[in-house]
Image: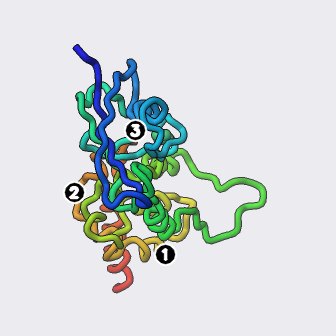
Amino acid sequence: MSKEVTFKVFRFDPEKDKKPYFQKYAFEPRQGMTILDGLFHIQRKIDGSIAFRSSCREGVCGSCAMHIGGKYRLACETQIKGLGKNITIRPLAHVPIIKDLVVDMKPFWNKYKSVKPYLMPGDPDPASHERIQSEDERKKIDVLIDCILCGACTSSCSVTATNEDYLGPAALMKANRFIRDTRDNATDERLRLVATENGAYRCHTIFSCQYVCPKDLNPQASIQEIQELGVKRILKEKE
Ligand code: FES
């Protein structure tokens, strides 16, 4: 029996093509081959014009996120085996296509930057030591710092699909990472940025972000925390 698989790959070169199309590539995968290995195989042996993005090849950099066999995943962490004989591969959604599977992540990064994704302690750095956290304080942000900013959550989000101003799960989870950080002293400023109509309150609790996250994180829980803190902030202001 043939062990051949067929990758049906999204192709689009805005400089040449009037509209996107799918191209099929059949090959016999080696044992243990990932989707990213398969794309490299196609690029090296079958069609050198195919474009995709990757870097670390071990689930760290987040650059190989794409829509694979019906779900947003990391190509370098997804085995070909188990996805059937025909595997459809598309780029991330809600961002412009540069070529084939390569997208322009600028809209994603702009939203990320808008939540001020850095520590704002509000006082000068101590001269003689780093800012100390206890083990318990550090644990509060443990689950949030593992985000590799691959964009899978934001692409899977149907709210992002219909509202380009929505900050999206990745940016909101990053904001919560700093809200929870005991060294940060800008919670009020952060909530003004993210507990907003196009921030946390735009989420429709669909949970697709949690479903696709390759690091098993839960952006939706962060969004809910921000929603609660936002309400508390407003109630406090009215006291
Ligand atoms: S290549 Fe870095 S996460 Fe896949």
- Front position in the image: 215 or 15: 15
Can residue 77 be seen here? The reply is: no
Asked if the residue at label 1 sits under 8 Å from ligand 1, the reply is no
- The mark closer to the camera, 2 or 3, is 3
Disc 2 target residue: 206
Question: At label 2, which amino acid type do we have?
Answer: Ile
What amino acid type should be assigned to the residue bearing mark 3? Ala
Mark 2: is the Cβ under 8 angstroms from ligand 1?
Answer: no
Q: Compared to 40, does 213 lie above or below?
A: below
Residue wearing tag 3: 75
**Label 2's element?**
loop
In this rendering, the count of numbered labels is 3
Q: Kindly identify which residue carries mark 1.
A: 189
Q: CA distance from mark 2 to mark 3?
A: 24 Å
User: Which residue does the image show at 24% across and 43% down from the upper left?
Assistant: 70
Local packing at callout 3 (Cα closer than 10 Å; few below 14, some 14-19, many 20+) is many
Q: CA distance from mark 1 to mark 3?
A: 37 Å
Q: Quadrant of the N terminus?
A: top left
Residue 53 in the image: x percent, y percent?
A: 48, 45
Who comes first in sequence, dot 2 or dot 3?
Answer: 3
The residue drawn where x is 40% and y is 31% is: 38
| Of the pair 192 and 185, the residue shown nearer to us | 192
Helix, strand, or loop for circle 3? helix
* Amino acid found under the numbered disc labelled 1: Glu
As rendered, which of 75 and 109 lies closer to the eye?
Answer: 75
Which label belongs to residue 217? none
In the foreground, 23 or 150: 23
Asked whether mark 3 and ligand 1 are closer than 8 Å, the reply comes as yes
- What is the CA distance from the residue labelled 1 to the residue labelled 2? 27 Å
